Image (cartoon, rainbow, N blue to C red):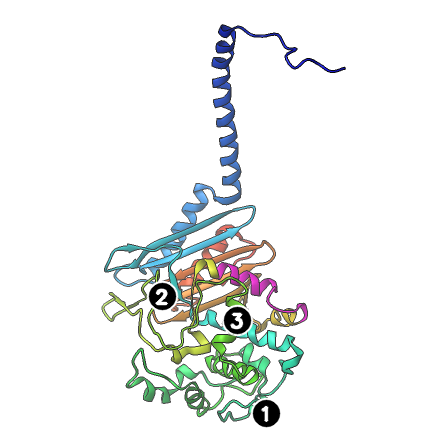
Amino acid sequence: MLRKKNSRPSLSRKEIIKRFRLSIPCVIICLIVALVAGCERAGDSRDFSIKIQQEIEAAVQSNLAAFGGNKSVPGVVIGIWAPGKGEYVRGIGYSDIAAHKALDPHDKFRVGSNTKTFVVTVILQLVDDEKYQITLDDTLDQFELGVDIPNAGDITVRQLCNMTSGLFEVYNAPQLEKIFKDITPRTRVDVRELVTLAVKNPPDFPPGKGWYYSNTGYLILGLIIEAVTKNRVEDEIRNRLLVPYGLKNTSFPVDDPDMPVPCSRGYTLDKKGNWEDHTVMFPPSLTWSAGVMISDMYDMKKWVKAYVAGSTNSEAIQKERLECVDTGRENMGFGLGIGCTGGWYGYTGGIEGYNTAAYYLPEEDATIIAFVNSQREKPSPGVANSIVRDITKILFPQHVAFY
């Protein structure tokens, strides 16, 4: 049976007004309840408790003071993403002391040896791709590198990646003084000359018989990428990684020593304990595939999870990447271009004026980033790593890094 459209009894004007007035408080109350519930959900999913935030900030400030001179280290950008616990993203201190400019989480930093994570990822992609016919156990004498490396027939690509090659550290080479004598930020340094200077020094140990941090190996990995692909290493990184992963604020400078804006200035201590601006000190070609890249915290958040979780490579090669060898340091292993500590995986970069750490904990899907605008690496484990360590003590006591 069809009902008439106006089957409900009509209300008087007075009754309608009465009901309307009564409905307003109910609507307001409902809105308040909904907003509060929404805020609580946002707080639960995004923000740590005030107490935890205070503990994090106290730990950060303590490290900035400990690694400073007459004044604390100028500043740091902190990013913490811990599902089920909270998030914390903040710039603390100054990006520019002279201008009294506060650090912003979007500021770019020189990421130093975090460059190595990109270089190794390209190497592993080449191994994954059968057309390039390269394996991790290929020896260096199988590549046309344009530089003579003693014992090249006994040193493998894998050993370059995990720092077990024994090659002398290039930036410790006494012969490097010849290059530094007249160097300017726009000097074009020949990478092959750097490698040649390094290998004039005796190796630290026979290949595969020890562990020592060697930038020399990563300069050679850059040369291997270029020899195999017939393309520049910066182009391979851009085309394979920066573009596909949407890392729009990450770059591999070639000739321009200046920082892209917005950026943090980089600082070092003078002999009197005061901060000097050393944002632009060296030419990009001096560090090249060992440490030249620039990025920001948000790009590094995407990147560290991508290469640790394995979305950049095949499952088989990723398993090899995460096989961490003993470095001789407590709670610190090293895989193929990746640091391993307390269940965390990632990398730390130090370069004049900057110290950056980016680590991911697969077990908790958690990420911690610490970008500091000064290269303060002593005492061990350095300012960026100390900040990461103290944050893990607060949030993940069962997974403490760098203890």
Q: Secondary structure at mark 2?
A: loop
Residue 214, given in percent of the width and then of the height, sits at: 48, 80
Front residue (pair 329, 47): 47
Q: Are marks 2 and 1 in contact (CB under 8 Å)?
A: no
Residue plotted at (65% across, 69% down) = 314
Q: Quadrant for the N terminus, please.
A: top right
Using the image, tell me which numbered label, if any, was put on residue 153: 1
In space, the residues marked 2 and 3 are separated at their CA atoms by 20 Å
Q: Where does label 2 land, which residue?
A: 260
Residue 85 higher or lower than 122, as above or below = above
Residue 121, given in percent of the width and then of the height, sits at: 56, 72
Q: Where does label 3 land, which residue?
A: 239
Q: Amino acid at mark 3?
A: Asn
Predominant SS along the magenta part: helix
Q: Secondary structure at mark 3?
A: helix
Q: Amino acid at mark 2?
A: Pro
Q: Residue furthest right?
A: 1
In space, the residues marked 2 and 1 are separated at their CA atoms by 41 Å
Camera-side mark, 2 or 3? 3
The quadrant holding residue 52 is top left
Q: Secondary structure at mark 1?
A: helix
Residue 80 higher or lower than 187, as above or below = above
Q: Amino acid at mark 1?
A: Gly
Q: Is residue 49 magenta?
A: no
Asked whether residue 338 appears in the rendered view, the answer is no
Residue plotted at (59% across, 84% down) = 156
Instruction: Look at the image and give the residue range highlighted in magenta.
Output: 300-316
